[in-house]
Image (cartoon, coloured by chain):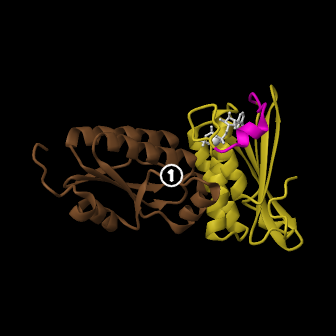
Amino acid sequence: MTDEFSRPPVAPVPVLRLGDVLLVTLQGDLHDSTAEQLQQDITERIGSSGATGVVIDISGIEIVDSFLGRVLAEIAAKAGLLAARTVVAGMRPAVAITLVEMGLTLPGLRTALNTEAALHLLGDPARSGSAVPRPGRR
Amino acid sequence: MEAAAGVDARLPIRSDLDLVWVRQHVRQAAARLGFGLVEQTKLVTAASELARNTLVYGGGGQLTTTRVAHGRAQGLRLAFSDRGPGIADLEQALRDGYTSGDGLGMGLGGARRLVHQFAIDSTPGVGTTVTVTSWAGRPPRPGHPREEW
Ligand SMILES: Nc1ncnc2c1ncn2[C@@H]1O[C@H](COP(=O)(O)OP(=O)(O)OP(=O)(O)O)[C@@H](O)[C@H]1O
Ligand SMILES: [Mg+2]
């Protein structure tokens, strides 16, 4: 085969902790099995860390199809059940155009232009309430 | 012809690793034929949907990619074929939200909206071939951008 086929396409996806937020950076072309593993990893990390927010940076992702879209939506749904909010950050314009044209609008997903904006969204007490200390929590 | 180099190919679709190769090949072939970034992204996304259907529902199969030309217009034709169970009710399969598995049911209909030409040839018990074509820039017959053939 030609050399374009020789590059190993996947690496495990790192999940970083930033205060109360888990930061996941997706890059390149994900195997379906990697995406499914990620869903499990994030859910477990939320459970074990008590994180209140998840930021998934997809600026390095060239396409989102219905499979990856479903994985992102399921991560957000599971995080929600564990009282954590998910923001998908950095979607490329070509990806956004494609999703709209194919009719995959993923209504449950909150988005931000970049990771910084996503962290702001999660940390802003006026918008989220998550920074307001609530008695009985933690 | 020279432009077909690196474009015409036959790729197996037997594992989720093959889906990665399919996306990479379609991306590179489309770029070589002069597709813009958004057009590339649409075609690669459609290819990803159709290749996954070939794998999941067709039990595996193959993709044949072909450069097509019409006057000065250049396009890329992708044929995904399998010898799986076939699709008994095409209208139902194309309906948004219909899935016989655990998907969103957006793959076939979504792929159809992302390409210029789309055709399904499926016979229950024999197999399925989905053929799509997109053109770099405008499709050659203006006014019939999604004509089926
Ligand atoms: N190659 C195929 N062989 C047999 N059946 C198929 C094939 N491709 C699609 N189908 C049938 O058509 C249905 C709809 O396909 P579609 O791609 O739209 O949705 P999905 O694959 O179920 O979910 P999604 O693609 O959104 O993850 C499938 O659930 C399946 O029943
Ligand atoms: Mg599908």
- Residue B77 x %, y %: 78, 56
- Residue B98 x %, y %: 65, 38
Chain A colour in the picture: brown
- Residue B21 x %, y %: 61, 49
Quarter-wise, where is residue A124 in the image? bottom left
Quadrant location of ligand 1?
A: top right
Which residue is rendered at x = 42% and y = 64% of the image? A90
Magenta stretch, main secondary structure, is: loop
- Residue A24 appears left or right of B80: left
Number of marks drawn: 1
| B31 part of magenta stretch | no
Identity, as a three-letter code, of the amino acid under mark 1: Leu
Q: Nearer the viewer, residue A63 or B118?
A: B118
Which residue is rendered at x = 66% and y = 66% of the image? B39
Quarter-wise, where is residue B80 in the image? top right
Query: Is there any visible trace of residue B119 in the rendered image?
Result: yes
The residue sitting at the left extreme is A135
- Residue A12 appears left or right of B118: left
Q: Is residue A125 above or below residue B125?
A: below
- Residue B127 x %, y %: 79, 32
> Quadrant where the N terminus of chain B lies?
bottom right
Q: Nearer the viewer, residue A121 or A30?
A: A121
- The chain letter corresponding to yellow is B
From the Cβ of disc 1, is ligand 1 less than 8 Å away?
A: no
| B92 part of magenta stretch | yes
Which residue range is magenta in the image?
B84-96
Question: Please, which chain is the residue tagged with disc 1 on?
Answer: A
Q: Which residue is mark 1?
A: A106
Q: Is residue A68 above or below residue A25?
A: above
Which residue is rendered at x = 43% and y = 53% of the image? A109
Q: Secondary structure at mark 1?
A: loop
